[in-house]
């Protein structure tokens, strides 16, 4: 693994180094994680975020625990369970910890084997996201051929790029692939209140890659779709249930409703590790994280002196509620773009992936 276009990597000291996403797009800082506690904290405080990268940090967190506790399996398991509970919605977190715990249980050289397994998970994600990019880009090409258009307008919500899953992201992977294939693509980037992952992270990634994009307030997508200005909507996912219902960043559901009303194809891009095969019904059963109301009251930005500041935008005394995710019902999803192909959002098709 190297650090270019990676959200996380092992540094020369064998510690996990991560891009501290809380400072983007203003500063590209890294944070060094030495212990399982550091890994846990970095997931909770959003130093790292995005389902895929949360899973990777969790896996490396178990390795850090193995190193710290010198192979003591009970202590490693305890630390792993804390990491597993650090955020509730993205299933990649639980998936990665469970996979690491199997290694812990079987291994005689726990630290070395955990390190190898965490690297393997990250390396597998590189291949998965490449495949998702290719399959998703084939969809872009077929929509362009069908509509006989030379420029493609994609709309995306939140950040599901290389900051969210190594190497090329889930939802952004087909966009990066389109650029490689020379397709004239433009991306509408939902700002994604309250933490603004679209405005601060997706735009930063796209700007860096030289991909045309326009940041839009979250409420703009419906209007654009009505005016024929969106050819496809694509998002990532944090957990997809067996019936095809998909949890993703709050506001995704509203985009899917607008897309259906305007006959705009709505796709979710995800690695198979984002399916929760044990969850029968996403709308009723997926645990939705409720985050601090301060994220709604306070906006983070940069002042004229270049200092990052939080400023309050609501009256003192008003309350806010901050659901981190919502669930888009399967009936609104055109298809699930995975490394294994385009999967229909239903029990039958998803069941075959297990
Ligand atoms: C991130 C979010 C992303 C998915 C993408 O939420 O909802 O769309 O995690 O998944 P948060 P992937 O910023 O609160 O973590 O990592 O598989 O692309």
Image: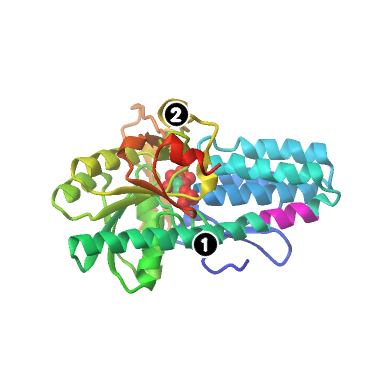
Whole-percent x and y of residue 212?
29, 67
Q: How many marks?
A: 2
At x 36%, y 62%, the residue is 137
Give the vertical position of 66 relative to 207 (above or below).
above
Depth check, front residue: 112 or 317? 112
Q: Which residue is mark 1?
A: 167
Look at the numbered disc 1 and give the secondary structure of its residue: loop
Asked if residue 338 lies left or right of residue 41, the reply is: left
Asked if residue 174 lies left or right of residue 260, the reply is: right
Whole-percent x and y of residue 150?
21, 69
Depth check, front residue: 68 or 149? 149
Report the magenta residues as a range. Answer: 112-118
At x 73%, y 56%, the residue is 115
Q: Which residue is mark 2?
A: 281
Look at the numbered disc 2 and give the secondary structure of its residue: loop
Quadrant the N terminus occupies = bottom right
Whole-percent x and y of residue 138?
35, 62
């Amino acid at each position: 693994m190297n650090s270019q276009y990676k959200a996380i990597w092992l540094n020369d000291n064998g510690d996990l180094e991560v891009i501290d996403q809380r400072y983007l797009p203003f500063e590209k800082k890294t944070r060094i994680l030495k212990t399982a506690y550091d890994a846990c904290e970095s997931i909770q405080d959003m130093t790292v975020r995005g389902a895929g990268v949360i899973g990777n940090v969790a896996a490396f967190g178990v390795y850090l625990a193995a190193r710290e506790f010198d192979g003591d399996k009970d202590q490693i398991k305890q630390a792993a369970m804390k990491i597993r509970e650090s955020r509730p919605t993205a299933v990649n977190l639980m998936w990665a910890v469970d996979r690491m715990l199997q290694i812990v249980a079987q291994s005689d050289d726990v630290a070395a084997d955990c390190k190898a397994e965490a690297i393997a998970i990250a390396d597998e994600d590189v291949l998965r996201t490449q495949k998702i990019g290719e399959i998703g880009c084939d969809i872009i090409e077929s929509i362009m051929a069908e509509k006989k258009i030379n420029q493609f307008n994609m709309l995306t919500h939140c950040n599901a790029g290389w900051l969210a899953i190594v190497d090329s992201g889930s939802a952004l992977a087909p966009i990066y692939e389109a650029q490689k294939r020379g397709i004239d693509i433009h991306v509408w980037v939902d700002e994604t209140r309250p933490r603004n992952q679209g405005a601060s992270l997706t735009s930063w990634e796209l700007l860096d890659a030289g991909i045309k994009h326009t940041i839009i307030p979250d409420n703009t997508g419906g209007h654009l779709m009505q005016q024929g200005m969106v050819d496809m909507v694509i998002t990532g996912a944090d957990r997809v249930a067996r019936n095809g219902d998909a949890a993703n960043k709050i506001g995704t559901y509203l985009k899917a409703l607008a897309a259906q009303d305007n006959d705009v194809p709505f796709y979710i891009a995800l690695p198979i590790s984002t399916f929760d095969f044990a969850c029968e019904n996403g709308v009723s059963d997926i645990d939705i994280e409720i985050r601090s109301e301060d994220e709604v009251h306070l906006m983070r930005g940069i002042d004229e002196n270049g200092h990052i500041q939080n400023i309050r935008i609501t009256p003192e005394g008003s309350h806010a509620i901050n659901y981190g995710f919502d669930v888009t019902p399967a009936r609104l999803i055109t298809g699930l773009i995975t490394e294994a192909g385009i999967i229909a959002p239903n029990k039958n098709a998803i069941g075959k992936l297990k």
